[in-house]
Amino acid sequence: MVSKPKRTIITVIGIIIAIYVLSPFYLVLVNTFKNANSIVADPVGLLGAGFGQFKTNLSNVVNNSNFNFWYAFGASALITIVSLALLALLGSMAAWVICRNKTKWSTVIYLTFIASMTIPFQVVMLPLISTFRDVGKFLGIPMLQSIPGIVFAYCGFGGAMTVFILTGFIKGVPYELEEAASIDGCTPEGTFFRIIFPLLKPVITTVTILNGMWIWNDYLLPSLMLGQNGKVKTLPVAVQAFVGSYVKQWDLILTAALLAMIPMIIIFLIAQKQIMGGMVDGAVK
């Protein structure tokens, strides 16, 4: 049992860490209620903040022709949803095959997935762009500045972590369930979709939320593949429209950033129990 002094120290440390982590969100939130001059004069305090200014900032962001909020929101939503669906389906299938086929090649493939997680994105981003450009020319399909191209890229970068987490969970699923299904005449495809896939719901929820927060908030990959002036823009890239060469519209930048954060915050608050449950289940198994 932890003594009272130690409990007090742990509580104080936890409060300090919480303040440190939440301080950027506080700065974004409080400054969306200010105009540009008030932000420069007092970026931390509540001086000059008002709900009327927030409505003005919100209206300027949503109706701004350079930002095009609803189009960017729709593009981000489409890219995120399609990428997550493919990652969940293909990742679970790959993890199941790796777990149930105990061969040298399956081990090599699994280790390759793990090794790819250690490679920083900055190392591969330039070869990635040239490779996608060459593949697009070969196939006659634009892989750059297109939604299918960036979805394909997200599936590639997110596949390693997805397979790694799902593999750890599937190892704890009793093989006898699959044997019983096979005896009853179930095909391998039927076994996966009727037996295995429903059991993966908790860990798939966890992986989907983790990948979703990464894809929704990602700036570097969309800016490289879609371009900052391309027809398709995600929300993080579109926020760049408020950053000029000489003047930075901080009131609009921070309001747009808040609008981009709200969907992920809501989803996390709703699904936080499933996220923690999936992590614990995966760790135990």
Image (cartoon, rainbow, N blue to C red):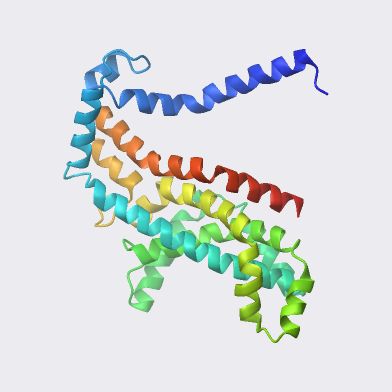
Q: Is residue 214 left or right of residue 160?
A: left
Foreground residue among 254 and 139: 254
Residue 20, position as x, y percentages in the image: 53, 23
Total numbered circles? 0
Identified at 70% across, 63% down, the residue is 170
Residue 103, position as x, y percentages in the image: 77, 75
Q: Most extreme residue toward the front, as rendered?
A: 184
> To which quarter of the image does residue 6 belong?
top right
In the depicted structure, whether residue 17 falls above or below residue 81: above
> To which quarter of the image does residue 251 belong?
top left
Residue 99 in view here: yes
Identified at 45% across, 61% down, the residue is 83
Q: Which image quarter holds the N terminus?
A: top right
In the depicted structure, whether residue 12 falls above or below residue 226: above
Q: Is residue 98 left or right of residue 121?
A: right
Residue 18, position as x, y percentages in the image: 56, 25
Q: Which image quarter holds the C terminus?
A: bottom right
In the depicted structure, whether residue 67 falls above or below residue 128: above
Residue 247 in view here: no
In the depicted structure, whether residue 36 falls above or below residue 82: above
Foreground residue among 87 and 218: 87
Q: Is residue 178 left or right of residue 84?
A: right
Identified at 68% across, 62% down, the residue is 167
Q: Most extreme residue toward the right, as rendered?
A: 1
Q: Is residue 201 left or right of residue 249?
A: right
Residue 233, position as x, y percentages in the image: 29, 52
